[in-house]
Each structure stands twice: as structure tokens, then as C-alpha cells.
């Protein structure tokens, strides 16, 4: 939604002048109240019967500054919101095309997730200032939720998340897919090959120690067309356990700025990346049963191996400094995983 209050316009200009500004100054309470009033009252701020009670920094803020805002409303006490900010000044790392930014995430909630009968945080609204690029995304805060891999009985909770993922991919009808094609990033051959090219380049200083990397890049590029034979669906894009919350029996994936049109096994490979084989087999079965209740594709194992190889290149081809630093550690397990996958597929 668009909000043209003077307070918010001035606020974004302040944010532009100070890229490292702390969250409490990014949106002063008066400006935040004005924005929330417009969002929660259907565009009629004067009809908003509430006030901000408290603001707490989100201890898990990563790419974007975020906070938990508690409202006192006339008809509901202590409504809690999750507010996420991009100030318009900091250079955004869009991950070589796999991240769309905060305004993109708002569109994913508005135009896509709201059409699906799945458990996601309530979407209240998003605002982007067209002069500064500053963006605010407002969602319902999920009280009592925890990251799925940190929850009690976490193995079974991870199984629930894998099952959720399979159902999500299975629920992507042609109508939903067509909606996604109108604005979502699409994982095509060019996108995949760019990751293998960067992996080959970034690992050049350590090819003597890990001589199989160039061959793995070649093999992956030769396999991309085979991977693309799998039916497209809407994917989360970075469905790792840090991005998946759970509360009771309900699973809530968050951080949808990497949502895309792609093949579902990419999400699954991201989810199980780095976990022990015994647990991975359990989670893969849960995904398969939910995704393909009538029968798993006969070539699933090969497709899944290619997807896992992509995930390794998604990490090794992201930042050259990080890649070399990982290579110099005592346990460069991603390099070893590439070798294992290459031997397995060959």
C-alpha cells in the first residue's frame, strides 16, 4: 500500500543520511504509528483505535533490521506485529539474483501467499517510499514460535517441516504458478550456470587442494537441463531450518524474499543440507509422501543429487572471500560434499 504522510517521508530521508542508524531511530514511534494506522484501518488513519505499547529489537535480525511491536487496540489487547525495515541507503546484497529485496518479499505475501491455504504469518501491509527506496514490511508476530531445529523433539519437528514443504509444492496449482510467473524470479539454465561459473572462479586459488571442483562444475552444467525437466513449482528459495518457525503443530516458513519459480527439490536440498544421513532419509521420505502421494518420480535420486550439488555451489559461488576462508579451515566439508556427490553421480 502507499502512504504519503509527511512524517514517513521525512523519516526515510533521515534513514538515507545514516545507513548504520539503529532500529529505534529508523522509524520514530509517531511515524510508525501513522504507518500502522493506515495499514490496520484500511487506509483511514483517523479510524485507528489503538496505540503502540512497546518496541523490542528482534535478536535474530540478519539482512534487514527488524523489531516486534506491541499494540493496544480497543477490541484486542496486546496485538504483536513483526516489522522489517530496509532504509534505502545501504547497498543491498541480492545474492547474484536469488534475493529480490524487501519490497519483493512484500509482493510475495500480497500477491501469492495470501492465495494459498498454508500457514504463513499474517500480512498486514508493506510500504516503499518511491524517493528513497526505503521499505517497511509488517507481518503478524508468531508468539511462542521457535526455529524448527531448535525446538524440543527437533527431529520430529524437522519431519513436520519437510512434510509442510511437500504439501506446499503439491498445492502449487497452474493458477498459482501463473500468478507467480508474473513477477517471481525464475530459475532457468542461465541462473544455474552462473552459480557453477562463480564457483569455478572463486575456488581457483584452492584447485590444487580440491582438484575435483572444476570437474564438478562441468558435471553440474551438463546436468542442468535434466533438472529442468522436473515440473516447475513455487519455491521458497532458501528453505533452511533457520528460516522455518514452528509453534505446536503449525509450521511457518519466513523470509520469502528468495521465492521463485523453480523445481521443488531445490528447497528440499537446502533444508537437509549438512545434516546426518539417517535424519536426512527420514525428512526426504516425509517430503516425498506429501509431494507425490501417487508415486515418487523414478529418477528422484538423480534429481536430488543435482539439487544438492546446486546447493553447494550456491554457497561456494556466493562470496569469494568466504569460499577461500572455508577452504582453509580444518573441516572444509562443503568441498568434500561436492566430491562425494560427484563420485555418486558419476
Image: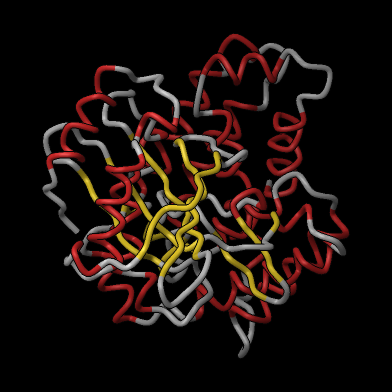
Measured as percent of width and height from the top left, residue 10 is found at 17, 32
Q: Please tell me whether residue 4 is drawn above or below residue 11 in the rendered image.
A: below
Q: Is residue 257 left or right of residue 59?
A: left
Task: Judge from the rendering whether residue 179 lies leftward or rightward of residue 195; answer left or right.
Answer: left
> Does residue 116 lie above or below 27 as drawn?
below
Side (left or right) of 206 relative to 106: right
Q: Give the residue drawn at x 62%, y 57%.
A: 244
The image quarter containing residue 151 is bottom right
Viewer-nearest residue: 303 or 275: 275
Residue 198, how many percent across, how many down? 46, 26
Q: Residue furthest bottom?
A: 294
- In this rendered view, identify the residue nearer to me: 7 or 298: 7
Q: Residue at x 62, y 14 (%)?
A: 324
Give me the residue at 34% from left, 20% from top.
19
Q: Position of residue 54 (x, y in %)?
A: 51, 48
Q: Quadrant of residue 334?
A: top right
Label total for image:
0
Residue 259 sits in quarter = bottom left
Q: At which x and y percent is residue 328?
A: 73, 12
Amino acid at each position: 500500500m502507499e502512504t504519503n504522510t509527511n512524517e514517513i517521508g521525512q523519516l526515510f530521508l533521515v534513514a538515507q543520511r545514516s545507513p548504520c542508524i539503529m532500529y529505534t531511530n529508523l522509524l520514530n514511534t509517531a511515524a510508525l504509528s501513522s504507518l500502522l494506522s493506515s495499514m490496520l484501518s484500511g487506509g483511514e488513519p483517523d479510524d485507528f483505535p489503538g496505540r503502540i505499547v512497546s518496541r523490542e529489537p528482534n535478536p535474530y535480525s540478519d539482512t534487514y533490521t527488524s523489531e516486534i511491536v506491541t499494540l493496544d487496540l480497543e477490541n484486542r489487547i496486546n496485538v504483536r506485529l513483526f516489522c522489517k525495515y530496509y532504509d534505502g541507503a545501504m547497498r543491498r546484497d541480492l545474492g547474484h539474483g536469488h534475493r529480490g529485496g524487501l519490497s519483493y518479499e512484500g509482493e510475495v505475501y500480497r500477491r501469492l501467499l495470501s492465495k494459498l491455504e498454508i500457514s504463513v504469518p499474517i500480512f498486514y501491509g508493506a510500504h516503499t517510499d518511491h524517493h528513497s527506496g526505503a521499505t517497511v514490511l509488517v507481518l503478524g508476530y508468531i508468539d511462542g514460535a521457535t526455529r524448527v531445529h531448535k525446538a524440543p523433539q527437533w527431529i520430529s519437528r524437522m519431519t513436520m517441516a519437510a512434510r509442510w514443504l511437500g504439501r506446499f509444492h503439491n498445492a502449487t496449482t497452474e493458477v498459482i504458478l501463473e500468478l507467480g510467473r508474473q513477477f517471481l524470479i525464475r530459475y532457468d539454465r542461465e541462473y544455474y550456470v552462473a552459480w557453477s561459473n562463480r564457483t569455478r572462479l572463486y575456488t581457483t586459488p584452492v584447485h590444487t587442494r580440491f582438484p575435483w571442483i572444476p570437474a564438478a562444475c562441468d558435471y553440474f552444467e551438463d546436468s542442468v537441463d535434466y533438472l529442468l525437466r522436473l515440473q516447475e513449482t513455487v519455491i521458497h528459495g532458501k528453505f533452511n531450518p533457520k528460516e522455518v518457525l514452528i509453534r505446536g503443530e503449525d509450521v511457518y516458513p519466513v523470509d520469502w524474499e528468495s521465492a521463485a519459480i523453480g523445481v521443488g527439490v531445490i528447497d528440499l536440498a537446502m533444508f537437509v543440507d549438512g545434516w546426518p544421513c539417517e535424519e536426512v532419509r527420514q525428512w526426504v521420505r516425509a517430503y516425498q509422501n506429501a509431494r507425490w502421494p501417487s508415486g515418487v518420480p523414478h529418477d528422484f535420486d538423480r534429481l536430488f543429487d543435482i539439487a544438492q550439488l546446486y546447493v553447494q555451489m550456491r554457497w561456494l559461488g556466493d562470496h569469494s572471500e568466504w569460499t577461500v576462508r572455508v577452504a582453509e579451515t580444518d573441516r572444509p566439508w562443503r568441498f568434500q560434499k561436492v566430491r562425494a556427490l560427484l563420485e555418486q553421480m558419476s
